[in-house]
Amino acid sequence: MGATGSEYVWFEELFPDLAEACCLTLVEGLDPDEVLRRLGGSEAPSLTGATAITEAAFAMPEESDGRRQLLAMAQLGSWTLVVEPNGYLGVTEDRALPASAGTRWISHFVNINGVDAWVWAEDGDLRLAFEPTLPESRRGSDPDGYVDAMRAAGFDFAPDPPDDYVPARACFAFAEHLTGVVLTAGVFERTAFRCGSAPIRMPPTVTSTGAGSR
């Protein structure tokens, strides 16, 4: 039996500031330096733990005049985890699809206003994209192939889901199903993240998908 969203309640309990506005991405077969390069980023000092990267991320818009955002990366086996506190590049399709060349890119985003997004890209192809709060509305080259796994992870397809439904938890479980990567509290508490900053907008033709931060 696969993971369910109930196994990831700890994320918002232990890391509330990060949980209310973040983007988490898993990239297969690329190291953090290559992920940073593909996103047009530049190196920044390493930081340990979720608190440190969250504080740095929320300071960066002022420091960069709103032009850059923090990327905190960690190698987890054959995958690189990218944490963007208050960021959204991982689900920005005109950034994620080119960056997924030759690899798999699994990303989910949520912000304090309830805006959320899921993107699965593979070798430049958008396999599956949807809003976790509205999993019944999907697009991509394989929008229906993983509906059973989505349900098992905890996505609620009912027109009126219960008040305690938290789709962000299901995102963790679905990402685990697709990648085999089990994220734990220890990853966020103790990891020395390889950090960088990336431009929010790439010149001149790249534009945002509209998934905003808080």
Image (tube, helix red, strand yellow):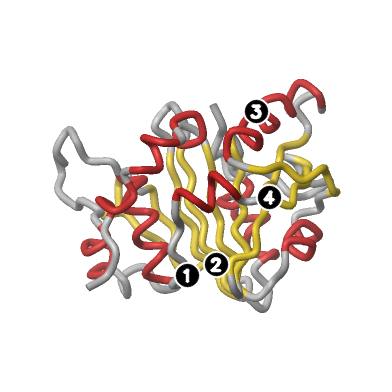
Q: CA distance from mark 2 to mark 1?
A: 5 Å
- Image quarter in which the N terminus is found: bottom left
For residue 201, the mark is: none
Pointer 4 with pointer 1, Cβ within 8 A: no
Q: Is residue 22 left or right of residue 139?
A: right
- Image quarter in which the C terminus is found: top right
Q: Which residue is situated farthest in the top direction here?
A: 62
Q: CA distance from mark 4 to mark 2?
A: 27 Å
Q: CA distance from mark 2 to mark 3?
A: 29 Å
Task: Name the kind of residue labelled 3 in the image.
Answer: Glu
Q: Is residue 191 left or right of residue 195?
A: left
Q: The residue tagged with tag 1: helix, strand or loop?
A: strand
- Mark closer to the chain start, 2 or 1: 2
Q: Which residue is mark 3?
A: 55
Q: Is residue 84 left or right of residue 6?
A: right
Q: Which residue is mark 1?
A: 127
Q: Which residue is mark 4?
A: 192
Q: Residue at x 36, y 62 (%)?
A: 174
For residue 121, the mark is: 2
Q: Nearer the viewer, residue 185 or 5?
A: 185
Q: Residue at x 45, y 28 (%)?
A: 112
